[in-house]
Image (cartoon, coloured by chain):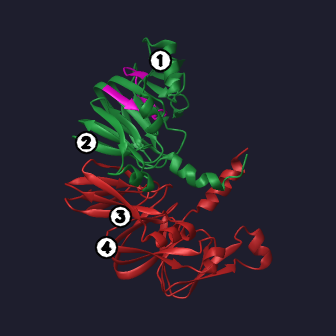
Amino acid sequence: METEIRDQPAFANILVKLSTGDRIVAESDAMASMSANVQMSTRWNGGVITAVGKRVFGGESLFVNEFTADGPSELVLTQSWPGDIKEIELTGNTLFLQPGAFLACEPTVRLGMGWAGLASLVGGEGLFRLKVSGRGKVWFGAYGGIFVREIQDEYVVDTGHLVAYEPTVRLKVALAGGIFSSFFSGEGLVTRVKGPGRIYMQSRSIGGLAAWANSHLW
Amino acid sequence: MKHQILARPAATIVRLLLEQGESVTCQVGAMIAMSTGFEVETTTRKKGGGGGIVKGLKRMLAGENLFINHFSATGDKQNITIGPGMMGDVIHHRMTGGTLYIQGSSWLASDTGIDIDASWQGLGKAIFSGESMFWVKCSGEGDLFLNSYGAIYAVEVKDQYTVDTGHIVAFEDSLQFQIGKAGKSLIGSFLGGEGLVCKFKGQGTLYCQSHNPPSLGKMLGPKLKPR
């Protein structure tokens, strides 16, 4: 299987070239187009209970699609919003993804759900998070560009901008500044992340787009 | 007419260079900037040709404008910059006879020799393909520019190819498509979020868009204030 992320960063999509027997798992509705000899089968996103949990608490889909190649073929995967896509190779380690960020993975990768905590909920990131672990490649997407930062100590991220982080990273919600500046500076609540570990952030947020669109509707 | 496509795929524009006597037909509102040596003519029909109001009305049903603009260069080395209203890609397609079916609102500009019509896609396809009820139908010879939300990629179909509904930009008439289910089982196809797909057959060029507006709308809609 060969993959290429095209049209970065505004309209990133993945071109997957498959050989006979190759398989790839993708988020519901991620397929844009594919060769006729790719078979698509739908399964629960984890077990039934995990899937329902992910849907209700994690903002993920109930089902994922598995694509299997009957011969040399291609598949194009995409996401709902304009933005970048990142590829990560897991080698036994774990990564937490924010709701909606997961796009695709190799079938050897395990998709689980983890409790993200109240801090995450208050920070606008959801009570649960998707946990990807095992070995193999994972692709996740964002609205806007994706940028990475290795943090050693504490670091501050605006709500709605955190996309993925390593399990060694802890989340805490805090005010951006004092009470006054927090509410009048437009920053409000922020997420304080504590390392060491790597975090992935997006350069725009859907909340920001909605606020902008709302201010222009009449 | 020479062309140059810039700022792909998010904010794409096309720069066209025309010599005296050459002209180009553009979608209403596509012109962003141009040099002063152009004569502009707005009609409902192909430049200097037939068609008239009926074709114009059909084009409207396909999601295009009733009127089209013709820009004719009155001097040498005249340039015009065109682009679509929304963010997204533009591609160039060279027509050498034959017909290209284009999704409504994706026709941006073409050589004046290309005929721009519309055709009804059939009831089943109209309801399920995720496209407008009518296709814009271009035939003839010359340069053609297509635009869409998302990046546009070309697929050379040899035998069969599947496209998710709402991702077709254009296809040559040597291809036909049928609406089918994405997976083996119908229920699975819907639960998997893919539902119905367009299954192409034949040999020819197919253009697809990487993103589609309804997916963004579905996510953004609930966050918008009621109007």
User: Can I make out residue A205 in this image?
Assistant: yes
Disc number for residue A108: 4
Alpha-carbon distance for marks 1 and 4?
55 Å
* Image position of B94 with respect to A95: above or below: above
Give the main secondary structure, helix, strand or loop, of the magenta stretch. Answer: strand
Alpha-carbon distance for marks 2 and 1?
32 Å
Q: Residue at x 52, y 33 (%)?
A: B30
* Badge 4 density bin: few <14, some 14–19, many ≥20, Cα 10 Å: some
Residue ID for mark 3: A25
Q: Which chain is green?
A: B
Q: Residue at x 62, y 51 (%)?
A: B221
Disc number for residue B55: 1
Q: Is circle 2 on the same chain as circle 4?
A: no
Q: Is the C-beta separation of discs 3 and 2 under 8 Å?
A: no
Q: Give the extent of the magenta segment.
A: B99-117
Q: Chain of mark 2?
A: B
Q: Is circle 3 on the same chain as circle 1?
A: no
Colour of the chain lettered A? red
Of the residues shown, which amino acid type is indicated by label 4?
Thr
Q: Earlier in the sequence, mark 2 or mark 1?
A: 1
**Image quadrant occupied by the C terminus of chain B:** top right
Image coordinates for residue B47, horizontal then vertical, percent:
44, 16
Q: Is the C-beta separation of discs 1 and 4 under 8 Å?
A: no
**Image quadrant occupied by the N terminus of chain B:** top left
